[in-house]
Amino acid sequence: MALRHAVLAALLDEELSGYQVTKAFAAGVANFWHALPQQVYAELARLEKEGLVAGREVVQEGRPNKRLFRVTREGLAELEDFASAAAKPAFLREDLLVQVQAADHLDTDVLIERLTERYAFAEAKAALFEELLRRMRGSLDEAEFLLRGARVGPYLTCRRGRDFERANRDWCRDVMEVLRARQAAGEEA
């Protein structure tokens, strides 16, 4: 996946400014794609030059003018082409996994500290995703939303982000339990 596809997907529902696209990334897309604001702005410029998005200037009083972008028919066709291609599997690259891989040769207490930090991060991020899911559902329960909700795609990707962070949290907890048990067994020997 290229940044272009993530930006096009973020613009599917409404016309957005570059700033709003970066906020949309932070709120929903960030669980599967990370981009710095300057990367998003540069990509919007490229997409506009290629005719995949159309931009218009909005005059604002007392503030700088802003540009709003929307996906064009060509941009939608680009997304359809992207969606019709086989998806490449993603590979997880995380420093903490390397640290755990070397656990037998590292200070267990320091490693448990790193796992505790990652556990707290995952717990907080999963809670943020859960709140976002609640806002998306509105008054509907999840089953009803999945059948009749206005836009199920962002909901499903947000749900994946929540589940990913829950899995990270649970893995950290399990690894800490193993390390503590091994530490205690080593002290008894």
Image (cartoon, grey):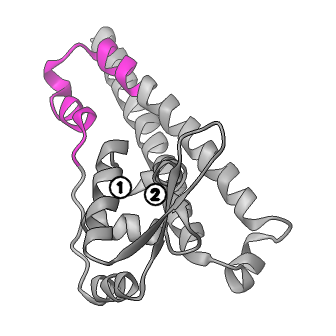
Residue 94, percent from left and from top: 25, 40
Asked if residue 174 lies left or right of residue 36, the reply is right
Q: Is residue 129 above or below residue 102?
A: below
At label 2, the amino acid type is Val
Magenta residues (range)? 93-115
Residue 153 pos. (x, y %): 54, 75
**69 or 113, nearer to the observer:** 69
**Disc 2 to disc 1: CB gap under 8 Å:** yes
- Give the CA distance from mark 2 to mark 1: 6 Å
Q: Amino acid at mark 1?
A: Trp
- Viewer-proximal residue, 94 or 116? 94
Q: In front here: 26 or 122?
A: 26
Mark 2 = which residue? 29
Q: Residue at x 50, y 66 (%)?
A: 157
Callout 2: SS: helix
Q: Residues within 10 Å of mark 1 (few under 14, many from 20)?
A: some
Circle 2 crowding by C-alpha within 10 Å: few under 14, some 14–19, many from 20? many
| Quadrant including the C terminus | top left
Q: Which residue is mark 1?
A: 33
Check residue 108 for magenta coloring: yes
**Between 51 and 78, the one nearer to me in the picture:** 51
Which residue appears at 18% of the width and 17% of the height?
106
Relative side of 181 to 105, left or right: right
Assign the magenta stretch its main secondary structure: helix
